[in-house]
């Protein structure tokens, strides 16, 4: 069962038919065994694919043949052997084994079939997530997510953004809102950050100019929907000396860049998911809030000017609008206090949402940078400026004009993978009912 | 006060004396004003440095001259003007202004002097962190931290590691330990993750082979030291089909790579901090635990074989050992249950720490991958295997041999920046006394 000095020489993807005759050591899981009596075929699975081990009783040692015959599905093994070209095997080659080392034995039966032959409910899948993730259609989601995050970082760093880490343990409500998880912090009460909003704004006052953070946020939302979780990854940026239009451009260019990168680097994962991603054209369509409300009404969904889009309204929009689009010029009254009102029409604001069909994936705005206006807006929303003391003081000593957005990593991933349930885009999702594994 | 359509055309670093005669718009903070009567010099500060604005009363409009005279330190302004070569000014150029727009006015006096002329205590600095961060010697730390994290990710991705996100809201103690912050999770109790340890191990059972995560961890440690905080960023890796020696090599190569990258990309920041970083040679020195204890004793610090290194022992080692080094072969009894015992001497383990002088910056090990041994070790540490049900089940259905480590991002940053107080390496640190800003 111990690894000892044995090491893998090749992953499945590294072996080619041209290596006919080469000695290799491969490691992975027993995906399938077909025992035809005089010959046994083992499909070995590693991160990138399958390798056929072909064991003819006449060509290999008796003890080795016996050990292969005893293998159990999903056990972890190392095989040493010789590569042999084979048109019928995956990748065009097979391995004639010279040794086998069993590294761990899998109990039988398995709580979930990782070969995708039997479909399982999402809860069964999440309970046995380690087996669920052995399916290529599931690991593909996380290969795309990893690439997406990588691509976001590279893009933002090229644009002069500096990565920051802001605290997740906070003394009071980020936006004065509800939906906070309380923590016992030694003898005091504290909360889990529901957004890095106030911190990234404080950072604008430091002169670091452009910052980004990719980190978990926590929301004590009671919703049980396909689009909400209580812990998600938020991609946040904030930039100085720019307005909402500037950061909307950054956002749409980022979406394009991620799609290009995923297309280039995740071809196998996309194919596994049966997805083809079209690179959207920029600028994305911009719909003013008022237009959006009219569209919603035109679909027979009742909704008044001045209210936030109910789910039915998002769905109605999703029937009309395809791909990514912005909703702009939101009513000031329904957006948070830090959103800049339109100077020509203060009832409207410089806030925007980025939508993908019926799904909101990002919210952003030009922010209020004037201390007195900010205090006034905090009060107008029924909040107490005293609870925002350390935030507000950053506005008194030289806060530049600034703008930014937050982009939900999982929701963005849903637009790439085509998944409808946000739980599928998180390794170990957290919702009202689920805290394990 | 509004930005309107005005945009910066150049950062300070983008302007060169050769641009003599060019029209530019620069934006930033009023760093210094020298009013000589007939001529006013303003030093404007942006992310990358200083720009001298030279305003001779005879050459510029009267109203503009008056507005410049009224400027207050640390106010946020935009200047338009003409570049003029000037040997005496920073960067070899000055700007003769044609317009000024005040974007925000700073209150006077400032709670902290951002020009570094007056030294302030750490608590004063952290209370006014947004001003503290305007000092080049402080922003340098975070420019290095951002580059360090970037470099870590690029290196790990080159090595085939996939980025993952594991939950920070957990149902029970990660390592069965104390030091957990309790959360009210709807009607239940939950905890904040003190380490992604169990999750990254579960990931080894998925076949994703090599994973990494850079994310906050939370420890309810009561220590008030220069090396501990209650929220820090942990860089975690876990890899399958490898042992402790393999991941130690990854770790030392990563340290080398980060230092090379910081040397290449953070020359200004290093210079500001007065640091020169020597690229360490690999392999790093490996000290067995027993040797380390003897060294400690040789320095007159009493300590028994079998106990963890007390602070005095680390200090004694720091006097003997320079740079980065490993301590290996730790006693099994004082390491967590998931650490693999040495097969030839089960009292010793395949655990290691990476030290920098007297500072532990990383801990890692080859892990136990055998289910029954793991259950036995959990029991032997007085813990209940039932609390580890979802973790343990991943070991029953094909867990490969694996190894990994966790590297403290802030402590690693301390070795790069030479700082002695971990609080200086965190934008908004959290300790027993501090929850704001």
Image (cartoon, coloured by chain):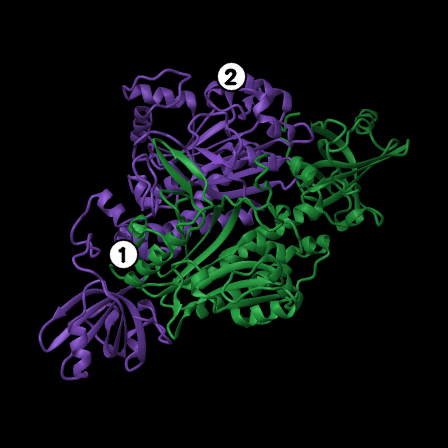
Chain colours: A purple, B green
Task: Residue B203: give x, y in percent of width and height.
Answer: 34, 55
Q: Is residue B409 left or right of residue A99?
A: right
Q: Earlier in the sequence, mark 1 or mark 2?
A: 1
| Subunit ID for the residue under disc 1 | A
Q: Which quarter of the rendered picture does the C terminus of chain B lie within?
A: top right
Of A88 and A96, the residue lying toward us: A96
For residue B108, above or below residue B330: above
Q: Badge 1 local density, few (<14 within 10 Å), some, or many (20+)?
A: many
Q: In this figure, which residue is indicated by the disc labeled 2?
A: A382
SS assignment at label 1: loop
Marks 1 and 2 belong to one chain: yes
Task: Residue B22: give x, y in percent of width and height.
Answer: 74, 43
Task: Residue B65: give x, y in percent of width and height.
Answer: 82, 28
Q: Residue at x 41, y 60 (%)?
A: B238
Q: Is residue B55 left or right of residue B12?
A: right
Q: CA distance from mark 1 to mark 2?
A: 50 Å
**Quadrant of the rendered image containing residue B321:** bottom right
For residue B133, above or below residue B99: below
SS assignment at label 2: loop
Task: Residue B94: give x, y in percent of width and height.
Answer: 80, 43
For residue A31, above or below residue A385: below
Of A296 and B220, the residue lying toward us: B220
**Quadrant of the rendered image containing residue B190:** top left
Farthest residue, direction right: B37
Which numbered marker is on residue B83? none
Q: Residue at x 54, y 57 (%)?
A: B151
Q: Residue at x 36, y 55 (%)?
A: A266
Answer yes or no: is residue A344 visible: no
Of A103 and B93, the residue lying toward us: A103
Q: Which quarter of the rendered picture does the N terminus of chain B lie within?
A: top right
Which numbered marker is on residue A134? 1
Q: Badge 2 local density, few (<14 within 10 Å), some, or many (20+)?
A: few
């Amino acid at each position: 069962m111990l690894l000892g000095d044995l090491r893998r020489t090749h992953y499945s993807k590294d072996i080619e038919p041209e290596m006919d005759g080469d000695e290799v050591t491969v490691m992975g899981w027993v995906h399938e065994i077909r025992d035809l009596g005089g010959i046994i075929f083992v499909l070995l699975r590693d991160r990138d694919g399958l390798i056929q081990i072909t064991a003819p009783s006449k060509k290999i040692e008796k003890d080795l043949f016996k050990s292969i015959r005893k293998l159990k599905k999903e056990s972890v093994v190392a095989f040493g052997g010789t590569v042999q070209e084979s048109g019928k095997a995956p990748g065009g080659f097979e391995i004639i084994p010279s040794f086998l080392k069993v590294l761990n034995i899998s109990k039988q039966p398995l709580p979930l079939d990782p070969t995708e032959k039997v479909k399982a409910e999402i809860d069964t899948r999440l309970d046995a997530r380690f087996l669920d993730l052995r399916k290529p259609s599931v690991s593909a989601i996380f290969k795309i997510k990893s690439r997406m995050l990588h691509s976001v970082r590279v893009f933002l760093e090229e644009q002069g953004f500096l990565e920051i880490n802001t605290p997740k343990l906070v003394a009071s409500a980020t936006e004065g809102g509800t939906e906070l998880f309380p923590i016992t912090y030694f003898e005091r009460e504290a909360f889990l950050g529901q957004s890095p909003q106030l911190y990234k704004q404080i950072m604008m006052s430091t002169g670091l100019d452009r910052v980004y953070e990719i980190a978990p946020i926590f929301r004590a939302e009671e919703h049980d929907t396909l689009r909400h979780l209580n812990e998600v990854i938020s991609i946040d940026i904030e930039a100085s000396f720019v307005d909402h239009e500037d950061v909307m451009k950054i956002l749409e260019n980022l979406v394009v860049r991620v799609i290009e990168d995923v297309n280039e680097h995740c071809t196998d994962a996309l194919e596994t998911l049966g997805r083809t991603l079209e690179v959207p054209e920029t600028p994305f369509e911009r719909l003013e809030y008022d237009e959006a409300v009219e569209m919603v009404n035109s679909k027979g969904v009742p909704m008044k000017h001045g209210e936030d889009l109910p789910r039915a309204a998002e769905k109605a929009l999703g029937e009309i609008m395809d791909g990514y689009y912005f909703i702009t010029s939101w009513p000031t009254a329904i957006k948070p206090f830090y959103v800049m009102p339109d100077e020509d029409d203060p009832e409207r604001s410089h806030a925007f949402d980025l939508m993908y069909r019926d799904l909101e994936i990002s919210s952003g705005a030009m922010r209020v940078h004037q201390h007195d206006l900010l205090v006034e807006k905090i009060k107008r929303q029924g909040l107490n400026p005293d609870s925002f003391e350390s935030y507000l003081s950053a506005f008194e000593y030289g806060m530049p004009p600034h703008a930014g957005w937050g982009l939900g990593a999982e929701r963005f991933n849903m637009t790439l993978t085509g998944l409808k349930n946000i739980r599928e885009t998180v390794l170990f999702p957290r919702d009202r009912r689920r805290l394990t594994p």
